[in-house]
Image (cartoon, rainbow, N blue to C red):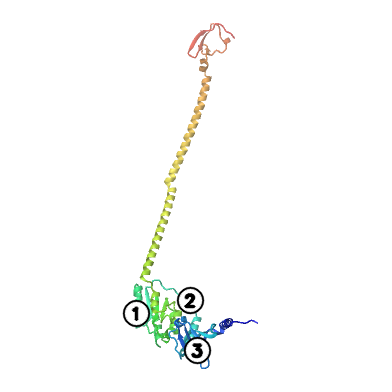
Amino acid sequence: MRAFTVSDLNNALRKHIEGEGLFFDLWLLAEVTEFRRYPSGHCYFTLKDERASIRAVLWRSAAERLTMLPVNGEAVLAHGRVGFYENRGEVQFVVDQMIPAGTGLLFEQLEELRARLEAEGLFDDRRKRPLPALPRRIGIVTSPQAAALQDILNILRRRYPLAEVLLSPCLVQGELAPASIVAALRRVYLESVDLVILARGGGASENLAAFNDEQVVRTLAISPVPVITGVGHQTDTTLVDAVADVRAPTPSAAAELATPTITELHQRVQELRARATAAIQNRIAEQRRAISQQMISLQRNHPRRRFDSARQTVDELLRRANRAFERGLLLEQTRLQGLQARLIALSPQATLARGYAIAQRADGQVVTDPAHTQPGERLFLTLRAGTLRVVAEETNE
């Protein structure tokens, strides 16, 4: 047999109770008793009817979203889930939303409208548009008598006095407020504004009913420009907040979201100036490099450069021709000198220089055979240095 500890049992009970989907997303109609808020901000109380009761807890984060905390004896509609507190072994109801019971029907109608509009896609995040960085004309839809208007104007003058502000006045409370807001929105859409702020100061939840009106929501959904809503306090949430491009927690916050500050603009201008200067310098450097490359290309392909190259080629050819001519001349001179030497060696003068003589008759006929002469015949002997006249005495073959 296995014995469970109390902690094991309570832990199993908690997992079983909190794990059942049936006990999530519940509405309880009950009376509040023993309500107490602790310094931590958490609220502990009991919800009961005529036959039963259950302990309840409202965590601080949920309590801060309520416009008013309940009081003992008040009938409420509480939304939340069933939880289990292990330390005491107690079932408790964890509340995340609570409204007076008298507003239950209105709340159900509001939730039905919310679900229908959401199903149509009016609350889809893909419809959200970015806010203009530097709006020139800002349309404000609110009551002229509202303190929220002065807060918005003061912030716009301080942060961004360059923007033109256009007020489209309307009622923001009462039965006539929805139609008045619709008319004001339609007027401002015709004024070529860059941005619209729909604002109202804080108040009880029933005073914000105009901002949950279907026609107001649909008119806001067809805005040609981005819309910022600043309705009520930070904890107030209306249907116009869901359809707007940006939801601000307060009217003052809406004005801050709509505009940059002069300091931010100055910093941005400095950044843009630095980026522009750097871009221009880079562009100039690139152009200089391109021009330099073009100059090099032009110099390389300039006709004068080609003429100089051709002239250099001609000069080189002339030098080669001169060298070839000189070499040819030298070779011819050498050949002629050889021929000259051979002629000199074969000339009669060279033979005479060696001691030989040429015998000739008076008629100039050369005598080459002694048998061709007669004794007593006069002959001429040609020597290297001159001519001798001799007489042939005898012949010897």
Of the two numbered discs 3 and 2 in the rendering, the one whose residue sits closer to the viewer = 3
Instruction: List the residue tagged with mark 2.
Output: 125
Q: Residue at x 50, y 29 (%)?
A: 332
- Which amino acid type is marked by label 1? Gln
Residue 275's image quarter?
Answer: bottom left
Q: Residues within 10 Å of mark 2 (few under 14, many from 20)?
A: few
- Is the Cβ of the residue at disc 3 closer than 8 Å to that at disc 2? no
Q: Is residue 263 above or below residue 39?
A: above
Work out whether residue 60 can be spotted.
yes
- Which amino acid type is marked by label 3? Leu
| SS at circle 3 | strand
User: Toward the viewer: 359 or 91?
Assistant: 91
Q: Position of residue 102 (x, y in %)?
A: 46, 90
Q: Residue at x 48, y 34 (%)?
A: 323
- Is the Cβ of the residue at disc 2 closer than 8 Å to that at disc 1? no
Lower sequence index among marks 3 and 2: 3
Q: Residue 175's mark?
A: none
Q: Position of residue 319 (x, y in %)?
A: 46, 36
Work out whether residue 237 can be spotted.
no
Of the two numbered discs 3 and 1 in the rendering, the one whose residue sits closer to the viewer = 3
Of the two numbered discs 2 and 1 in the rendering, the one whose residue sits closer to the viewer = 1
- Which amino acid type is marked by label 2? Asp
- Is the Cβ of the residue at disc 3 closer than 8 Å to that at disc 1? no
Instruction: List the residue tagged with mark 3.
Output: 47
Q: Residue at x 51, y 17 (%)?
A: 350
| SS at circle 2 | helix
Q: Residue 150's mark?
A: 1
